[in-house]
Amino acid sequence: MLLQLSSGQGPAECELAVAKLAHALRLEYPKMMVHKTVAGVRPGCFKSVLLASDEEVSCLEGSIQWVCPSPFRPHHKRKNWYVDVSIVNKGVREEFHDNLVRFETFRSSGKGGQYVNKVETGVRAVYVPLGLSVESTEARSQHMNKKLALNRLYTLIADINHQSEADAARLRRLEHTRLERGNPVRVYEGAEFNRRE
């Protein structure tokens, strides 16, 4: 499970709240790991932090409120800072396994001399879990066409994985704009970032 903490395009105080929340959650959930960070405008602050967790943390989804006078602007009136917590998609990654490929042979047309339309040198490779299929007919031997078809399948699945990861990253970026200021699922107070019970 990936948990994204975001300042929601808020000021430096919200970015500091992201850093403090990430630290507090890692103390609360010791197995939680930092997956990725986006630095904020000030040292030690983050626009967003992506945390990976094997534990059930869906109760954290929503907005987190930090009640504290601004540590950066001493006479600023605002004392409430918010962080958006979202469960986000990592991007489904399809692992390629040779043993899940089904091969079909057929007679190929084109170059091949006396063997054209007499020997089944063309190869269709079907990746069974996804139903993807590719063909190779350019080589004169079935063995070589089998290798070419396998390489094409591998490339096709790599492209699908790349697109899935890009889509997941785009959705994570969209999450930054949906910060709700109010109705927090948790409230922390003071420079020590103590959780209000």
Image (spheres, rainbow, N blue to C red):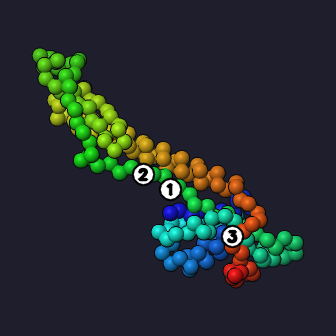
- Identify which residue is drawn at 60% across, 69% down: 59
- Count the marks: 3
* In front of the other: 138 or 124: 124
Frontmost residue, 91 versus 75: 91
Which residue sits at x=55%, y=69%?
57
* Mark closest to the chain's N terminus, 1 or 3: 1
Q: Which residue is mark 2?
A: 93
At label 1, which amino acid type do we have?
Lys
In screen coordinates, is 62 left or right of 119? right
User: What residue is shown with label 3?
Assistant: 185
Q: Amino acid at mark 3?
A: Val
Name the image quarter holding residue 114.
top left
Image height check: is 32 above or below 192? Answer: above
Q: Which mark is residue 90?
A: 1
Helix, strand or loop at label 1? It is loop
- Residue type, label 2: Arg
